[in-house]
Amino acid sequence: MDKLTSMKVFTYVVEQGSFRNAAHHFDISPTMVGKHVSFLEQSLRTQLIHRTTRKQSLTEAGRLYFQECQRIIEDITNAENLIQTLINRPTGTVKVNCPVTYGKKILAPIVADFLAEHPDLNVELLLDNNLIDPYRSDADIIIRIGELVDSSLVARKLGDYQMTYCASPSYLAKHGHIACLEDLDQHHCLGFQYHQGESQQVVNMPSNTFGLTHTRLTSNNGDVLKFAAIKGAGVLLQPKILVEEELQSGALVELLQKHAPKPKPIHLLYRSKQLSLKNRTFVDFVLTEVH
């Protein structure tokens, strides 16, 4: 086996905590992932990972080897970046992690234009509403919505994420006008739910109308809630970019505009100021397109 490939597989397993995730990432079987790790253990004549049916953990040797693997892989990546910068022709794959709605509505068209303009570059775009750890993820670029708490990351602001209340004309005709937030207590509401549990809309809101105990429908997909709202199922609180077309066509009506939640900042994040040429090319392209 190629030792460098095995080191990359081992490092990914440790970062993601899963043989299955590594198998998916490298497009190999979980069995093959195990063979890569076993190959390294046999070469080093020591165990790197404690494996049980429920979990896995690094041995002391595994922790040391993981740190060295990270350093070696980073050194190789830096060397490749230097060559790309020298010939001024970025190549490779840019790995991007982004929330689902923003990714579908805003980033996806930008990525398509980016690929057309840079034929030697590829993009691996993962749409995910989970809050990932930037230092354990292999993503080069992370799009995050909300206030930032980690000051060690490099952040470039992309704009603001506006939320809006809306409902269908048929729902309002049947259930009556909504003049204030308190009126929502008497209405059917549709709530967005992250995998972690609580609805994003309840954060910093004066009422818990969109909490899990007050909604007729909850889903971790905004489109599902939008379709339900169009059919008259209830009141929606979703990003404005998700419902713009429906608001323009009249399929949905905007409500409580003066009471909309405060817009949240949208940032493009990366770990180091010293970006590789491929990543810098992508970042510059996105910033140009959104501003």
Image (cartoon, rainbow, N blue to C red):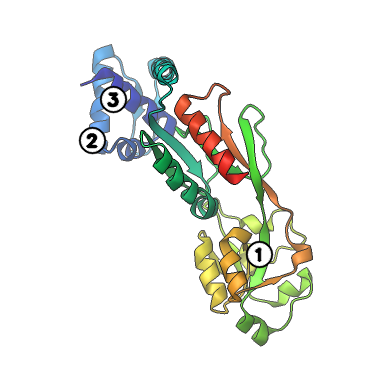
In the structure shown, which secondary structural element does the residue marked by tag 3 occupy?
A: helix
Placement of the N terminus among the 4 image quadrants: top left
Residue under the point 45% across and 29% down: 278
In the structure shown, which secondary structural element does the residue marked by tag 2 occupy?
A: helix
**Above or below 150: residue 266:** below
Tag 3–tag 1 contact (CB < 8 Å) = no
Q: Return the residue found at the far bottom.
A: 174
203 sits to left or right of 135: right
Amino acid residing under circle 3: Val
Amino acid residing under circle 2: Thr
Placement of the C terminus among the 4 image quadrants: top right
The CA span between labels 3 and 1 is 47 Å
The CA span between labels 3 and 2 is 10 Å
The answer, for residue 216, to whether it is visible in the render is no
Residue behind mark 3: 37
Q: Residue 124's x, y, as percent?
A: 40, 40
Mark toward the start of the polypeptide (2 vs 1):
2
Q: Residue 146's x, y, as percent?
A: 66, 45
In the structure shown, which secondary structural element does the residue marked by tag 1 occupy?
A: loop
- Along the line of sight, the residue nearer the viewer: 162 or 83: 83
34 sits to left or right of 54: left
The answer, for residue 229, to whether it is visible in the render is yes
Q: Residue 139's x, y, as percent?
A: 47, 35
Residue behind mark 1: 210
Residue behind mark 2: 31
Q: Residue 148's x, y, as percent?
A: 67, 38
The CA span between labels 2 and 1 is 44 Å
Mark toward the start of the polypeptide (3 vs 1):
3
Which image quadrant for residue 18? top left
- Along the line of sight, the residue nearer the viewer: 234 or 167: 167
Amino acid residing under circle 1: Phe
